[in-house]
Amino acid sequence: MSANDLTPAQQLLAAIHNLNMADYQTDPTGQPVVRLTIRTMDGEFVGEVQLGQRATTETTNAVSVVAEYALAKPSTPDLHPKAVADLIDMFDNLDLVDLTKSVLNAVTPTGRLAATQAIDDMFGHIPHPGAENGDL
């Protein structure tokens, strides 16, 4: 088994253990009501944790909410290959310099510097001949 197989199980166990520790800190006299054992898909033992009442309730509620969301989530529609190809072509044919010029020319002169800085923050400074002179 690879370490990649073990990591998600260890992360789950650690998260549940943290929840249980919070439960224990709020009620140190509380008794465990559930023993949860975590194994990989291959059956390798990862660990176990005994959960108190509050941790059991919180874990059950969290799993229920995630399950409800997953069941209610609409499925992704099947996209027609031609539509996908058309979208890819459309984006491939965009002239980013022309698009940038159009955006900057549509901005007021006082907002142009802020717009340029925002673009530079996203993509890094891309020198363009004449842009330093205000020629777009």
Image (tube, rainbow, N blue to C red):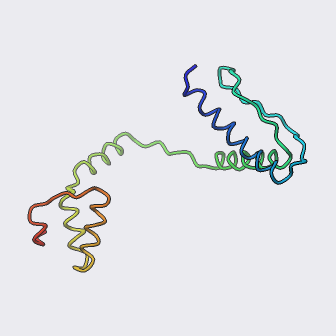
Please tell me which residue is depicted at 59% across the width and 31% down the height of the picture: 7
Q: Quadrant of residue 125 in the image?
A: bottom left
Quadrant location of the C terminus in the rendered image = bottom left
Q: Where 33 sits versus 102, above or below?
A: above
Please tell me which residue is depicted at 29% across the width and 72% down the height of the picture: 114
Quadrant location of the N terminus in the rendered image = top right
Q: Where 21 sits versus 123, above or below?
A: above
Q: Position of residue 8 (x, y in %)?
A: 61, 34
Between 12 and 42, the residue placed more toward the observer is 12
Q: Is residue 132 left or right of residue 24?
A: left
Between 127 and 89, the residue placed more toward the observer is 127
Q: Position of residue 69 (x, y in %)?
A: 65, 50
What is the count of numbered marks?
0
Q: Is residue 14 left or right of residue 84?
A: right
Q: Where 1 sits versus 94, above or below?
A: above
Between 2 and 64, the residue placed more toward the observer is 2
Q: Is residue 42 left or right of residue 80?
A: right
Q: Position of residue 6 (x, y in %)?
A: 61, 27
Q: Where 59 sits versus 97, above or below?
A: above
Please tell me which residue is depicted at 69% across the width and 20% down the height of the picture: 43
Q: Position of residue 105 (x, y in %)?
A: 20, 73
